[in-house]
């Protein structure tokens, strides 16, 4: 294991308490926090699985940030594609709440495909991990959606009989934890990357010699986007996942294709990743200086492990012009006149307004899924869901409808190349 390395510059909390609480948004099990860089307010994923801050430069953010002292490098991550080109920039000023760092390196990636915003439904300008965690103790309160950052010398541990404490190991400045999985009634110890930047519950790397194998009950699916492209693999269930006395039964698991994780498996001891859909079930204290992580169950712990039963992945796809009815009270004579109980005549002027609304497109469609068998296709723009216009919902609210109970009927009206079509299908629980 490599040792942790510390630069002369670090995050320092600019208040007397040496501690600060910062609210975050929890979107698809991912933590989105406000980060100010060189005076510009941005939204970042808090990702324990990255060693350096990365900005996705699809909006020419670097011009606004006045990125300087840049050198060209190549970054490699999960996915089937090649390394991506990036500019490494030094001497950037980062502010997270009351914490400031005056000399922060960052990497600006110019690949327009590396844009998480369409799939999450909110602007995401970059990802941040190790540089914050190495300097400060970070408490992640998933249940109340805030992080608390504290100077290590000001942090006081409390006695907690309901907590489980683990040692963290580090490899390439990324944290690993030892846990256990139960597969085919066999308890198997596993070493997992703690990955708050992953929205799934658990990823495991198949290994016959260890017994880490998918059950016969699985389906092939899109698993997510890595730095080097899309990741595909199997989705299934395992008997149990356990962090000492905390046991989660019938947990979701994904087994990524070997081609997508060749880079990740360079650390030979790694068996997979512990990600957001399990992490959110705990309030977590990450203390890199003491190489410690503490878990405490929260209200999400007993939440049933569900999954997308439709086979549809949606993403923002620009905007569309929507005609909406507009009712306004008027003193003028109109067609729709009503008389109130007190004899007052109220005249409604019924007109229309046009406004730009988000468009949601199907970007991934699982083979043999209910939606695919119904006839839906990649590129379809979803206009209505169950009789209601999709622009009335956030992307996450629509996606949650695909996680509902087995047998739930979904009705979609879609636009396919200017032709409006209606489809319906029933959600099917593959693992029932």
Image (cartoon, rainbow, N blue to C red):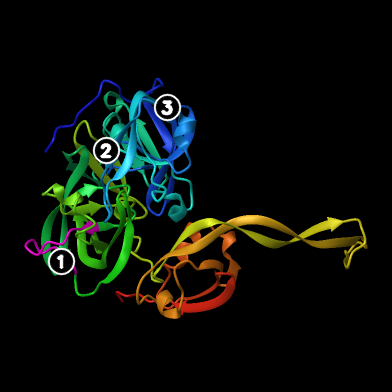
Kindly identify which residue carries mark 3: 98
The quarter holding residue 37 reads: top left
Magenta region, residue range = 203-214
Dominant SS of magenta comes to loop
Q: Is residue 111 above or below residue 182?
A: above
Of circles 2 and 3, the one toward us is 2
- Which numbered disc flags the more N-terminal residue, 3 or 1? 3
Of circles 2 and 1, the one toward us is 2
Q: Position of residue 248 (x, y in %)?
A: 25, 60
The quarter holding residue 138 reads: top left
Q: Is residue 38 magenta?
A: no
- Which numbered disc flags the more N-terminal residue, 2 or 1? 2
Mark 3 packing: few (<14 Cα in 10 Å), some, or many (20+)? some
Q: CA distance from mark 2 to mark 3?
A: 22 Å
Under tag 2, what secondary structure? loop
Q: Residue at coordinates 48% horizontally, 46% vertically from top-left? A: 123
Q: Is residue 265 left or right of residue 221?
A: left
């Amino acid at each position: 294991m490599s040792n942790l390395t510390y630069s002369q510059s670090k995050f320092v909390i600019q208040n007397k308490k040496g501690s600060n609480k910062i609210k975050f948004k929890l979107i698809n099990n991912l933590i989105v926090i406000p980060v100010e860089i060189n005076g510009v307010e941005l939204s970042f994923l808090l990702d324990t699985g990255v060693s350096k801050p990365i900005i996705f430069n699809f909006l020419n953010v670097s011009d606004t940030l006045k990125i300087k002292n840049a050198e060209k490098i190549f970054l490699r991550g999960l996915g089937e594609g090649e390394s991506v080109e990036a500019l490494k920039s030094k001497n950037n000023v980062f502010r997270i709440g009351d914490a400031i760092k005056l000399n922060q390196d960052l990497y600006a990636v110019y690949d327009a495909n590396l844009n998480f915003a369409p799939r999450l439904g909110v602007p995401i300008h970059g990802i941040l991990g190790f540089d914050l965690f190495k300097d400060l103790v970070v408490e992640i309160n998933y249940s109340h959606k805030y992080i608390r950052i504290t100077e290590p010398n000001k942090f006081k541990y409390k006695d907690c009989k309901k907590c489980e404490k683990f040692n963290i190991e580090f490899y390439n400045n990324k944290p690993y934890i030892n846990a256990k999985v139960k597969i085919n009634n066999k308890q198997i110890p596993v070493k997992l990357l703690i990955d708050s930047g992953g929205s799934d519950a658990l990823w495991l790397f198949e290994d016959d010699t260890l017994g880490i194998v998918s059950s016969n009950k699985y389906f092939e699916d899109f698993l997510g986007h890595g730095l080097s492209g899309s990741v595909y693999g199997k989705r299934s269930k395992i008997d149990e996942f356990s962090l000492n006395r905390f046991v989660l039964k019938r947990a979701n698991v994904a087994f990524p294709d070997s081609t997508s994780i060749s880079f990740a498996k360079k650390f030979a001891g790694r068996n997979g990743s512990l990600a957001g859909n399990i992490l959110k079930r705990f309030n977590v204290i990450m203390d890199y200086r003491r190489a410690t992580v503490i878990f405490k169950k929260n209200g999400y712990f007993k939440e049933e492990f569900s999954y997308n039963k439709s086979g549809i992945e949606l993403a923002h796809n620009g905007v569309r012009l929507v005609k909406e009815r507009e009712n306004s009270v008027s003193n003028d004579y109109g067609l729709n006149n009503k008389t109130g109980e007190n004899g007052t005549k109220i005249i409604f002027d019924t007109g229309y307004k046009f406004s730009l609304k988000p468009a949601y497109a199907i970007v991934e469609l699982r083979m043999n899924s209910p939606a695919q068998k119904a006839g839906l296709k990649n590129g379809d723009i979803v206009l209505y869901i169950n009789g209601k216009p999709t622009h009335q919902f956030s992307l996450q609210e629509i996606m949650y409808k695909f996680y509902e109970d087995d047998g739930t009927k979904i009705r979609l009206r879609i636009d396919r190349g200017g032709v409006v079509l209606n489809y319906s299908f029933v959600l099917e629980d593959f693992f029932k």
